[in-house]
Amino acid sequence: MPETMIKADGLVKIYKSKQTEVLALQGLDLEVEEGELTAIIGNSGSGKSTFLNMIGGLDKPSAGSLHVGGKNLFRMTEGELVRYKRDTVGFVWQNNGRNLLPYLSAIENVMLPMCLSGTHKRRAKAMELLEQVGMGAKKHSRMNMLSGGEQQRVAIAIALANSPKLLLADEPTGSVDTRTADYIFDVFTELNKGGQTVLIVTHDVALSKKVKRVVAIRDGKISSERVLKEIYADRLKESSIDWRKEDTQEEYAIVDRAGRVQIPAELLEAIGLKGNKVSVGVHDGKVVISNPQEKEAKEKEEKEHAEGKGKSK
């Protein structure tokens, strides 16, 4: 059975300044199993990047707990945290300048993290990783000789240099064209097929439709999950599928431990809700959420109708 790679429990993050206080995470709970390829989506300010930074060991919560690979991130010493960031997680940034040194060749860039960890046979392993991401032929190229997509593939190889248990990618296709984005995503898919656990933060709706599990964060907590429909599960690479148009996933709302569920704004608009109150009931084994104003209007109409009948008599 797969082990739990990520276990987040009640994560809260409050950023404070002299004038303001921003609640970035509001009790976020999430589990990701070893070997999963998961995408996290959400609008700017939803808390997804804050969460990714916590998993990467770059930030700490105001409350809650986070375990990665069985390790409690918030009880580590500084030395343990350095080793965690070096050996347990690999990070691919949207701005690949954070991964790459421009004065080194592609293969030298990939070898550099191995020097810090004392890995043997560094050149052979670096070459293997470059081949894995389709960059073997450009091993001696410096960064100014490579396109944005090629640089991002080298960045993925660097993130894999120390064989991390978990690969984190923050908007990895955000600065490349659609064709290159598809290629980069295919690299993540192939890595995942080999057993690599991958967690991607993305705004790209088309790419998120190709992932078996998509977690949506809204207002600092998990609001919904989308799971790839069974008929698409084995067809991820078929060129005949237009992922930007087809409905490839089933969407589920998430009920948190306090029994709360976030209702999508478009559904509330569809029932004409104007305030912040809803009527909740059970009908034929289903939880039904309705606009109380409709009920009030109906009762008012029935009352006026009954009064009108009384007068006519």
Image (cartoon, rainbow, N blue to C red):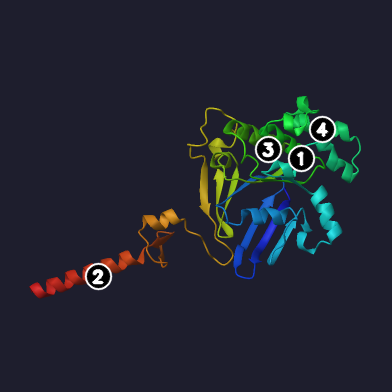
Disc 4/disc 2 C-alpha distance (Å) = 76 Å
Image quadrant in which the C terminus is located: bottom left
Q: Residues within 10 Å of mark 2 (few under 14, many from 20)?
A: few
Camera-side mark, 1 or 2? 1
Residue 66 % position (x, y): 72, 60
Who comes first in sequence, dot 2 or dot 3?
3
Q: Earlier in the sequence, mark 4 or mark 2?
A: 4
* Residue placed most toward the observer, 6 or 288: 6
Q: Residue type at mark 4?
A: Ile
What residue did someone put label 2 on?
300
Q: CA distance from mark 4 to mark 1?
A: 11 Å
Residue corresponding to mark 4: 107
Find residue 100 and name its label.
Answer: 1
Mark 2 belongs to which amino acid?
Answer: Lys
Q: Position of residue 80 (x, y in %)?
A: 85, 57
Which sits earlier in the primary sequence, circle 1 or circle 3? Answer: 1
Earlier-in-chain disc, 1 versus 2: 1
Query: Do the residues under discs 1 and 3 have CB atoms within 8 angstroms?
Result: no
Q: Residue at x 68, y 67 (%)?
A: 63
Image side of residue 197 versus residue 222, left or right: right
Task: Give me the residue at 77% from left, 53% from top.
Answer: 69
The residue beneath circle 3 is 188
Is 85 on the left-hand or right-hand side of 23?
right
Residue 76: image location, x then y, percent: 81, 61
The residue type indicated by label 1 comes to Leu
Q: Is residue 159 above or below residue 45?
A: above
